[in-house]
Image: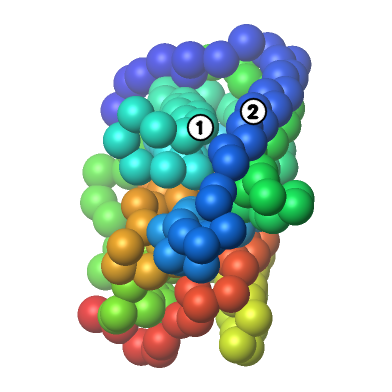
Amino acid sequence: MRGWLFALAAAACMILIISAALIASGAASSDEDRLGQNVSEHSWIFVNGYLEESRVMQTHAGFAGQKVVLGTRGSGMATRTIDSVVYNDRLGDYMVDGISLTISGNYDYRPYIPPMTQSDLKNALCAKNYEVGSVFSESYNIDKDLIKDTKIYQNDSFSVYEISSEIQGTARIGQRVQKNARTSPTYMMNGMYMGYAQIRSELVAGNTSVLTLPCP
């Protein structure tokens, strides 16, 4: 598989978007119930092969609120770090929502040709909230080896999903955070990493986005 890596070598950027909306005191509880979920991501990857990544972060559905969309695709050697926060909070009569995103990376293009045959050795894990649709999933097709350490913690206030993986093969990561059935997804991420990859990721979701194990 041949491809291209859409990024600049030693690239770094930071995006900060904040908005404030006035909420009448009588409707505060129902409006707050429809606000997006608080979520933060801290992740680092190294890939020597091929990668595809996409992320969508938003504070409201449709044309309202703040939106950030980013993606990377191509073959080569890549090292990148992402720190992001999507939040909603009350300041007096105002609800303040915003997105903070910092990206740094090094990308070097080189062709990548996947192996002729793939192993039938696989590993997968999925955690899901069936009521509102929040999902965290990871799956691996192991060509040579896999070293994996996944931790999930949850209580009534927040959920934490941590990935620490090293693989020669193909890794797929999918994450979606949604507060309840009346809100839009706050955070959606899909990633595929082929060849040799190291993945470190921590995703923290605020209250009411509790996960249920297992899921299909």
Badge 2: residue crowd in 10 Å (few <14, some 14–19, many ≥20): some
Q: Secondary structure at mark 1?
A: loop
| Residue at horizontal 30 percent and vertical 67 percent from the top | 181
Q: Are marks 2 and 1 in contact (CB under 8 Å)?
A: yes
Residue 11: horizontal and vertical position, in percent?
Answer: 70, 16
In the picture shown, does residue 46 fall above or below 177? above
As rendered, which of 73 and 15 lies closer to the eye?
Answer: 15
Residue 22: horizontal and vertical position, in percent?
Answer: 58, 41
Sequence-first disc among 2 and 1: 2
Q: Is residue 59 visible?
A: yes
| Residue at horizontal 58 percent and vertical 58 percent from the top | 25
Labelled disc at residue 66? 1
Q: Is residue 167 left or right of residue 43?
A: left
Residue designated by label 2: 17
Labelled disc at residue 37? none
Q: Is residue 4 left or right of residue 32?
A: left
In the picture shown, does residue 42 fall above or below 73? below
As rendered, which of 5 and 176 lies closer to the eye?
Answer: 176
How far apart are the alpha carbons under marks 2 and 1? 7 Å
Q: Quadrant of the C terminus?
A: bottom left
| Residue at horizontal 49 percent and vertical 74 percent from the top | 209
| Residue at horizontal 33 percent and vertical 72 percent from the top | 132
Badge 1: residue crowd in 10 Å (few <14, some 14–19, many ≥20): some
In the picture shown, does residue 32 fall above or below 101? below
Asked where in the image residue 75 lies, by quadrant, the reply is top left
The type of residue carrying mark 2 is: Ile
Q: Secondary structure at mark 2?
A: strand
The type of residue carrying mark 1 is: Gln
Q: Is residue 173 visible?
A: no
